[in-house]
Every structure is written in C-alpha cells, then in structure tokens.
Amino acid sequence: MTDLSATTSSAYQQALEVIASVEPRIAEATRQELADQRSSLKLIASENYASPAVLLTMGTWFSDKYAEGTVGHRFYAGCQNVDTVESLAAEHARELFGAEYAYVQPHSGIDANLTAYWAILAHRVEGPWLGEAGVKNMNELTDADWEKLRHELGNQRLLGMSLDSGGHLTHGFRPNISGKMFHQQQYGTDPATGLLDYDALREKAREFKPLILVAGYSAYPRRVNFAKMREIADEVGATLMVDMAHFAGLVAGKVFTGDEDPVPHAHVVTSTSHKSLRGPRGGFILATEEYAPSVDRGCPMVLGGPLSHVMAAKAVAFAEARKPEFQAYAQDVADNAKSLAEGFKKRGAKLVTDGTDNHIVLLDVTSFGLTGRQAESALLDAGVVTNRNSVPADPNGAWYTSGIRFGTPALTTRGFGHDEFDKTAELVVDVLQNTTPGTTKAGAPSKATYTLADGVAERTRSASAEMLAAHPLYPGLDLS
Ligand SMILES: *Cc1c(COP(=O)(O)O)cnc(C)c1O
C-alpha cells in the first residue's frame, strides 16, 4: 500500500475531531476499528481494504442530494453534478468490464439482484403481456387484467445454485425473498468432488424450464464456465443472470477471461463493488442493450434514491481497477489462494474440491474433529478472522457447519505474498490441531464449545503481528 503523507494523517485527525465534537464515542469507535483492522489477520473472503481515495470520496456533501431517476431524467432539480458522477461511474464500469450498459445505483449486492430480477420480469413477462393486451402502460389495464398480470409476474421460475453448494441466499433460497417471489429450484455440486455438475444442471434446466438461470457463488472455490451456462440457458429459453459479487475483482483484473468472464455470456450481470473489486460498499448491474431499458428503471421502481457519494466512490474505484496495477493485484489474489491451499494440503488438511482456482479456500474442519462454529471461534480467539461455512452435504447443518471459508483479497491488498500465506496456513492448522471440542452439560459432544490449548492464541498472535507489521494497513496514517 502507498504511504500516506503527514498531511493526510492530519486531515483524518481533524475530521475525527469534528466528529468527536458531536459524538465522541463514534470518533472513538472509528479509531478503534482502524486499530482492530490493522492488528487482525483478515481472511474473510468478502472483505477488502478500499483505498484512501475511495474512502475519502464517500465523506462529502453528495450524500445530501436526492437524485431519483436516471442521468438527465431526474425527479428532482439540481442534479447536474450527480449526473456527472453517475455518468462517469457507468462509463468506467462499461470500459472496465467491456459491457454494453452499466447501472451503478444499487446500494448493495442484494439490491442489485432484486433490481435485476424485476428488470428481467419486466422485460420477459410484463412487456410482452402489455403488448398482447395492446396497451402501453399498466394504468390502462382493467382491474381484472391487472390482477392477471400480477399473477403472471408472481409465478415465474428461477433456477440457482444451492446455499450449501456455495450459492447465495438471493439465488432462490426459500426463506429469502427470491425463494418466495419465484417458483424456485436449486442446482448443486457433486457431493463426491465438490465440483459443479454441468450435466446434472442441464438435466434439471431441461425439466424445470426456468425463466431465469442464476450463476455465481459466495463460497465455491473454483472457476465457472459461463459459456456453458449460456448454452444451457439458451437451450431452455432462460435469461442468464450471473452474480459476480464475490469475484468481480478477478473479472476486472483479467484473471477470468474467455469462457470464465461472465460479461460476454450473460444477459445480465450483478455485482457488489466492495469485495474483491476493492471499491466502496455498494452494488451495480451490467446488461446487454436488450435488457438495459428495464434495468435503468431500477430507481424508483425497486430501489430507494441513489447514494450519490457512493456512486462517486464507485467511479474512483472503477478508475483504479482500470490501471495495470489492479491486474497485477488480481493475479496475486489468485496466486495467493493457491499458496494458502497448498499450505493447508501439505500440512494434511482437507479442502473442498481439493484446492482452489479463484480467491476462496474452503477448509473442511471435520478432520480436526471440529465443527465450523468451533473452528471459527478458536481462530478468532487467536486473532484470525474468518467465517464458518457449509460444506457439500454438510453433516452439521447450516448453523454449526463443517467448513471455514478463507479469502485472499484483503491481505493481498496489504502486500501478503506466497510466504505469508504459507505461514498463515501453518498458524491456522496449529490453532485447529490445538482445539478440543467441548461437551454439553449432559456430557454429550457439543457443536459449539471448545478449549484452545494454553499458549496457542499468544503464539499465533505474535507470529501474525510480525507479518502484519511488515505489511502495514494504510501506512503513514497516524491517529495517535
Ligand atoms: C455478498 C454477496 C451478495 C450480497 O451483497 P451485499 O452487498 O451484502 O448485499 C450477493 N450475491 C453474492 C453472490 C454475494 O457473494
């Protein structure tokens, strides 16, 4: 990370003083958050460290502006500067990903998915329906016809990857709104290999004939062939939506190209901007010309007013991602995941799919005699921040789980390379080997309690502190 100047430090100091003059506890929590992030081994696969330029862009008066609508067509007056910001963010996104159209208003990944679902329904169901009824506008429909259209919109089919195979809640998981607004079915991975089974998926798609096929994942440690996904979608007349929330940085950084780049193959691509892409917390949508007009109506039809300050920060982050340095970063993220995976394997640990070719490593902790919950807590005690995750056909269910998900984007931003990730694997294995599962009051095995052997947390913390000190977060930023 580039060194910040003394001037930047003093600007941050002064900003915190302004905040402290109103609510000192918030200024204090902000300082503490930096201290905590600096001193922990952050291996959460969905997190990163945005640049000071991205962070600073969010702290401005753009936050005060209402800008419902789209560039040049706002429901509020005085949006000329927001128009500049939104146009630039969209232009950078189109150029970065080679997309025909970009929509940068969604506030998060989930909002982007919801907006995309309604856009696809509008394009595939509502539009043709209104056409057949010979009306241009829903308000011209009789009440009876309107009810029929609502019924039609509410009875479409969606096929997405199951949660325990690595899919996301919004890909048709029943308790999620996506599982309720669609008739849904889920595809998964082969329980023996943990790999996506395209033939089984094709079979399922042929039988189910979904309107929308969703590809993308939050916890699948392998690349996906999006050309094959598009073939399957075309065969059954489905719209292919790819949710690249997790791996957008690897697409932007040209690690995923050809069949592994979703943009040339999908009709609609949704994403977050804050995970491997390293931008502000937010979402965005890419689409073909065909779907663009429907996606463009996201706000105010699905979304609340755009966060102009965050759109500005997205523009800055996309501009950063267009630089050659970002491509080098993305390649390092993938190389480092391999180093971490190799580090686990050579120490005898078991990985879902036996490795990785993206930024995620999924460790099966059953071989340590632990649940994901016990492993996650023991690691946290030792200053290693991860999250527990289901493994395929998980014997411990979705709450306790049997896996720990690791990701390399954040620590790669700090400058960690092969040696540090190999050392990280050593530290993790040491903690897990020295964690004993507890028992319940009745003496039965517990899925939650555990004991970490004496001295392990201390030796892990001191070894990580050494690596973290060699790769400081926001170097030069002094808030003491
Ligand atoms: C993280 C994630 C989301 C949700 O993003 P939020 O910004 O938290 O709403 C959606 N889809 C996938 C695949 C994700 O990994």
Image: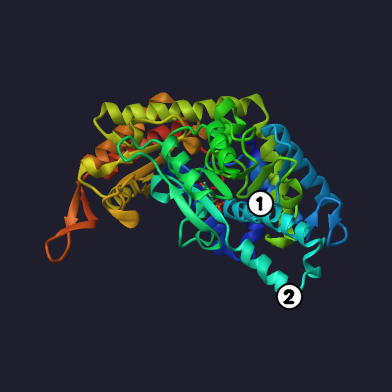
Judge whether 91 appears above or below 398 on screen.
above
What mark, if any, has residue 268 been given in the picture? none
Image coordinates of residue 255 in percent, x first then y, are: 55, 27
What mark, if any, has residue 143 been given in the picture? 2
Write down the quadrant of residue 337 in the picture: top left
Residue placed most toward the observer, 193 or 56: 193
Image coordinates of residue 402 in percent, x first then y, are: 29, 47
Pick out the residue farthest to the bottom: 143
Inspect the image, locate mark 2, and give the three-letter code of the amino acid beneath it.
Asp
Mark 2 within 8 Å of ligand 1, using the beta carbon: no
Residue placed most toward the observer, 375 or 189: 189
Residue placed most toward the observer, 74 or 432: 74
Q: Secondary structure at mark 1?
A: helix
Residue at 74% across, 43% down: 290
What mark, if any, has residue 120 been given in the picture? 1
Judge whether 274 appears above or below 146 on screen.
above
Q: Secondary structure at mark 2?
A: helix
Position of 220 with respect to 324 (left or right) is left
Mark 1 within 8 Å of ligand 1, using the beta carbon: no
